[in-house]
């Protein structure tokens, strides 16, 4: 094992379970989540030489996971599930409210969001990433990530108010 491999394992340890659960949220299927999270770890290990020491590891590896999930579904020509989960709804663009029970209406509303908005809601509201981390994972500026989140929350409120 090289020094880089040991450093990679040290950084991966605290987030490895989060990678799987994020993959599960994105795919909706445990077997697919295992496949893509393992593939993302392999890709990250191969690319670890490009990781800048002192930068944040978690957004870096979650960005790799996000790209791996997208690639996984492109090759299979089936839609991203992303959403067999509960969602914190929101009364404004910054403060999520807890949902008392899982509902088909919430899942349907999530499925109808634009993919970028859905990803922003999942990252920030479901997985408690900061806006900066979410922007890094989505590969966009913080303002763009914030707009996607705000639009996603607003669309959810409109759909759920009907």
Image (tube, rainbow, N blue to C red):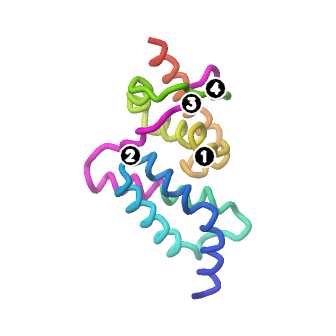
Provide the secondary structure element on which disc 4 rests.
loop
Provide the secondary structure element on which disc 1 rests.
helix
- State the mark number for residue 93: 4
Residue 123: in magenta span: no
Q: Residue at x 42, y 58 (%)?
A: 68
Q: Is residue 39 left or right of residue 59?
A: left
User: Magenta part of the protein: which range?
Assistant: 66-93
Q: List the single residue furthest toward the right.
A: 54
Q: CA distance from mark 1 to mark 3?
A: 17 Å
Mark positioned earlier in the residue sequence (4 or 1): 4
- State the mark number for residue 1: none
Mark positioned earlier in the residue sequence (2 or 3): 2
Badges 3 and 4: C-beta atoms under 8 Å apart?
A: no
Provide the secondary structure element on which disc 3 rests.
loop
List x then y, in percent, for residue 45: 52, 74
At label 4, counting other C-alpha atoms closer than 10 Å, the crowd grade (few under 14, some 14-19, many 20 or more) is some
Q: CA distance from mark 3 to mark 4?
A: 12 Å
Q: Identify residue for label 2.
A: 28
List x then y, in percent, for residue 37: 45, 61
Q: CA distance from mark 4 to mark 2?
A: 26 Å
List x then y, in percent, for residue 33: 40, 56
Q: CA distance from mark 1 to mark 2?
A: 20 Å
Q: CA distance from mark 2 to mark 3?
A: 18 Å
Q: Is residue 81 left or right of residue 126?
A: left
């Amino acid at each position: 094992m090289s020094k880089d491999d040991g450093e990679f394992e040290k950084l991966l340890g605290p987030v490895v379970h989060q990678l799987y659960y994020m993959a599960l949220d994105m795919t909706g299927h445990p077997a697919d989540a295992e496949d893509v999270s393992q593939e993302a770890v392999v890709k990250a290990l191969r690319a670890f030489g490009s990781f800048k020491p002192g930068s944040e590891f978690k957004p870096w590896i979650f960005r790799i996971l996000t790209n791996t999930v997208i690639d996984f579904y492109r090759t299979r020509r089936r839609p991203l599930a992303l959403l067999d989960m509960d969602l914190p709804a929101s009364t404004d663009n910054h403060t999520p409210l807890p949902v008392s029970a899982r509902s088909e209406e919430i899942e349907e509303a999530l499925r109808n969001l634009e993919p970028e908005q859905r990803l922003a809601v999942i990252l920030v509201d479901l997985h408690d990433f900061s806006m900066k981390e979410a922007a890094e994972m989505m590969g966009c500026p913080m303002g763009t990530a914030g707009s996607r989140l705000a639009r996603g929350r607003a669309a959810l409120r409109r759909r759920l108010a009907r």
